[in-house]
Amino acid sequence: MTRTRPQIESNAQQWDECRRCPEFNSCYQMSMAKVALENWVASNF
């Protein structure tokens, strides 16, 4: 099995809009937890 890293691009305007959202903290924490879990699974299996 081969895993490739996706190319990530930033968009400052979208980030600013996201930060203004009242759901930002819970959404961001969930996203970071998903990334951490995916990384753990990829490195342990």
Image (cartoon, grey):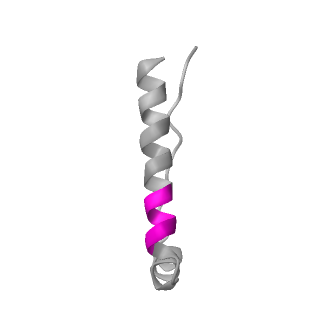
Judging depth in this view, the residue of 33 and 14 nearest the camera is 33
Residue 6 rendering spot, x and y as whole percentages: 53, 41
Q: Residue furthest front?
A: 26
Q: Is residue 37 above or below residue 24?
A: above
Q: Which residue is pictured at 50% across the width and 56% down the height?
A: 31
Q: Position of residue 28 (x, y in %)?
A: 46, 64
Give the farthest residue toward the top: 1
| Magenta residues, dominant SS class | helix
Image position, residue 41 (x, y; %) = 48, 28
Screen quadrant of the N terminus: top right
Q: Nearer the viewer, residue 30 or 6?
A: 30
Q: Residue at x 50, y 79 (%)?
A: 13
Task: Please give the name of the residue rendered at 51% of the width and 45% of the height, measured from the top-left corner.
Answer: 7
Residue 5, compared with residue 1, is above or below; it is below
Residue drawn at the location 52% of the way across and 77% of the way down? 23
Q: Which residues are magenta?
A: 25-30
Q: Is residue 11 magenta?
A: no
Q: How many marks do you count on the picture? A: 0
Q: Work out whether residue 9 can be spotted.
A: no
Position of 23 relative to 31 (above/below): below
Indicate the position of residue 29 as horizontal and vertical percent values.
43, 61
Towards the viewer: 33 or 42: 33
Quadrant in the rendering for residue 39: top left
Residue 7 appears anywhere in the view:
yes
